[in-house]
Amino acid sequence: MSTSAPRRRAALRFVGALSLAAVLTACRSEPTSPTPSEIPSASEPSEVPATPMPDPAVHATHAGSHVWFEGTPAQALARAKTEGKPSFVYWGAAWCPPCNELAADVFEHPRFPELMRDVVPVYLDGDTEEAQSWGEQLGLSAYPTVLLLNPEREELLRLNGALTITELETALRAALVRGHGFIEAVRRLEEGRVQPDDFHVLAHAAWELLPDTLWPQTRRLTALRQAATQCPTARVQERAQLAAHTLGLALMGRGTHALEPQIQAIRAEAQRYLDAIFVDPTAWRAARTFITMRATDVLQWLYGDMPRAPPAPGTTPSSSSPPAVETAHATAPAAPAMADEATLRQRWLEAAEALGKDENASRETRLWSVRPTLDIARREQPQGALSEPLRDRVEKAVQAAVLAAESRSERQAIVSGASYLLRHAGSPHRARALLIAESRRDATPWYYYTLLSALEQELGRMDEAHRWSAEARKSASGRATRLQWMANDIALNAERSGADQRAYLLALVDQYYTLATQLDDGFSGRNRSRAEQVARALAPHKQDRDVITMLARHRPRCSTLPEERRAFCERHFDALR
């Protein structure tokens, strides 16, 4: 397809914007002071208003809000077509930690407005009206996702939230200046005529977020193996990113029978991919998310479960403990030809430690750099308190990161990760205190309540877990957010027994369907996934007379939905008969 003159001019102007390196001081907002709060009690679900509640300001704004197009997505895309400009579509939510990390690292950066000067920047908040329908049209689900579309709405590039401002700049330059994007780069790769600059686009793309309907996993795995193999050695950053994508997608596909031959082939080549990731500090920074998050998965995949020590004399193993195994490879297929586990651990920890000391890395990355050490310790000791020096290291890293956070976006992203690290280091009391304190000061407390519920579940404190889940549901605001947290609470309560619990579940399900059928997009996009989650939770209760009566009462309301969404709504209720 030929490039139109307006589109060429927009691309050239974009190159000029990329060359600007103005350094300005970003405006940082301080969080509000804490206010007293008590642990909630589980009570009857509050009533759903006759019409959906308006969304609070938190859903209408986001970091860099002065940059985003003011108007509907349809108006923004129409403007882009008229002016011959690409569209930069950001899909996210105010409560989502990776979204807030992206906001802190990119949207709040002083250079971001310059990068957006010659595109139409669209903030598609998942809680705004018709957002889920737009998400469905554009193949968006996971928060956050960034799309770059040409003026004809054809996708040039899809990115996840793990970006720096420089990486965003590089990815946009590659997709825009050449006048073509990811689809063309993959096509050339598959046809054996890949061009050097294609590796920029291929390396930065969010392969894990591509829609399965257009990009089945088998095609993605094949393309990634080709790209990782053909990427020149001198392109250290792109090689590391492609290697991390390849291993990450293979890990995601484990257990899928049709993918097993490809996954085992990648496993056999694992040493080559790991060498690309751990070759030097440039590669470490490029593959930072893989390094900080994937140690446990990779070690288990390549080397199997760790051997369990036999019980001490005079004791018996816990009934919940896994049986002892005799070798480290007991649950894994034959080990690939690669270095021993100790060598890989050493390389992994060296890279993670360097990321923790890298002052150019984000605070989130520096905080998460302690996770590989924690994960490797947990590989050897899955339960119980870890060594005091390791717990102390985690607690100090958490304290430093939380105190250093400057904006609300940065703090929200850091606190969720900090609570995870504290939990898994064996400091649940500190994680609990951090989450309760943060829930009192943040505009999206429901996310922290959900983390508190998960923490209490891990500790076997189910009454507290249910209380926090109820509080999360009741405090959630926003169209899709409310449905998501209602569905979560339904799933947690569906297996509880007793008359009171049955009444609670029925009231909660009634509340869910009342809201879902009020919203035009109540069964679209992520909301459709929530409906499927509720259906799974209700499956054991399909013969309950009260459930049957309630579902029969709500099904006719499907007829009030737009025609293209009505069919799924009706099929949803019919499947529960």
Image (tube, rainbow, N blue to C red):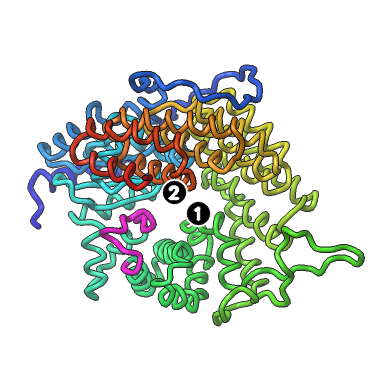
Query: Who's the residue at 43% across and 71% down the image?
Result: 257
Taking the spot 36% from the left edge, 37% from the top edge, the residue there is: 111
Give the residue drawn at x 35%, y 25%. 60
- C-beta proximity under 8 Å, tags 2 and 1: yes
Q: Which residues are magenta?
A: 204-219
Residue 240, can we see it? no
Which residue, given by chain and number where applicable, does mark 1 sit on? Answer: 289
Does residue 353 appear to the left or right of 267 in the view shown? right
In the rendered structure, which disc, 2 or 1, sits on the residue that comes first in sequence?
Answer: 2
Mark drawn on residue 9: none
Q: Is residue 443 above or below residue 413?
A: above
Circle 2 sits on which residue? 162
Residue 392: percent from the left, percent from the top?
A: 76, 45
Q: Is residue 450 above or below residue 221?
A: above
Residue 277 % position (x, y): 50, 65
Q: Is residue 259 left or right of residue 436?
A: left
Badge 1 crowding class, 10 Å Cα cut-off, few under 14, some 14 to 19, many 20 or more, is some
Please, which residue is most extreme toward the front here?
545
Q: Position of residue 301 (x, y in %)?
A: 56, 69
Quadrant where the image shows the C terminus = top left
Q: Is residue 526 visible?
A: yes
Q: Identity of the amino acid at label 1? A: Thr
In terms of secondary structure, where does tag 1 sit?
A: helix
Q: Secondary structure at mark 2?
A: loop
Could you say where residue 531 lies in the image, as x and y percent from the top left? 38, 41
Q: Quadrant of the N terminus?
A: bottom left
Identified by mark 2, the residue type is Ala
Tell which of 479 and 96 is nearer to you: 479
**Picture quadrant of residue 377:** bottom right
In the current view of this chain or complex, which residue is farthest to the right?
A: 314
What residue is shown at x 21% (from left), y 62% (from top)?
A: 184
Whether 343 is among the magenta residues is: no
